Amino acid sequence: MFSKAGRTTALATTAGAALLVLAACGNSTPAASSATSSPAAAAGAAGAIGVHSTPAGTALVDSQGRTIYAFAADTRRHSNCDGSCLHYWPPVPGSEAAMGAKGSVTAQLGAIKRSDGSSQLTVNGWPMYTYIGDSAAGQSNGQGTNLSGGLWWVVNPNGTWITDAGASSPSSPSSSGGNGYGY
């Protein structure tokens, strides 16, 4: 039916199309409910989670350079910030996890599904937020504040929380009993 040259061309065309499909699949984003996306998988991606120096220390920042915070009243894979809390502490969108990490970020990025159906970034399983009181990169005005029902902590590149007392966070392997909140 096909000559030898025709078969070779048809195979080359099919192989090329298959490679394009595989390349496109390789750039797909994880499901919003995924809690384990690898930072190394997308290292160096433009607009990815990064680091910035703040008065609280070296901190994770979102794709727009805003400092990222953890809420002590949350639990792993569950946000307890709802209602008016969300006005002051906007959740970092879960799509940030799909963009990956850049620089010295070693924390594990993922996402959870919020009760309203939206997706929220997690760092080592903990939901992440920005603070309305930070208006420029490098600010950490929410650090250590007791607002919206709990304390808020800046998160460092390995995912541990930077606390005023210098204690290890609940996501730190060296933690001996959490952060005083039973987590």
Image: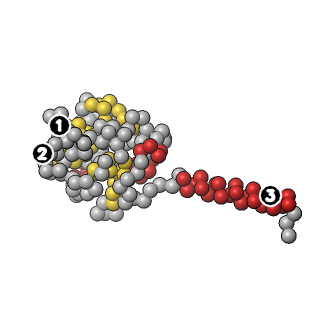
Q: Amino acid at mark 3?
A: Thr
Residue at (25, 54) in percent of width and height? 76
Residue 82 in view (yes/no): yes
Q: Are marks 1 and 2 in contact (CB under 8 Å)?
A: yes
Look at 15% across and 34% down and name the residue there: 165
Q: Which mark is residue 167?
A: 1
Residue 3 x/y as whole percent: 87, 63
What element does badge 1 sit on? Answer: loop
Which amino acid type corresponds to the residue marked 2 in the rendered image? Gly
Kindly indicate the quadrant of the structure image that contains residue 14: bottom right
Q: Mark 1 near mark 3, Cβ–Cβ under 8 Å?
A: no
C-alpha separation, residue under disc 3 versus residue under disc 2? 67 Å
Kindly identify the amino acid type of the residue bearing the numbered disc 1. Ala
Judge the density around disc 1: few (<14), some (14-19), many (≥20) Cα neighbours within 10 Å.
some
Residue for badge 3: 9
User: Measuring 44% from the left and 56% from the top, which residue is drawn there?
Assistant: 30
**Does dot 3 land on a helix, a strand or a loop?**
helix
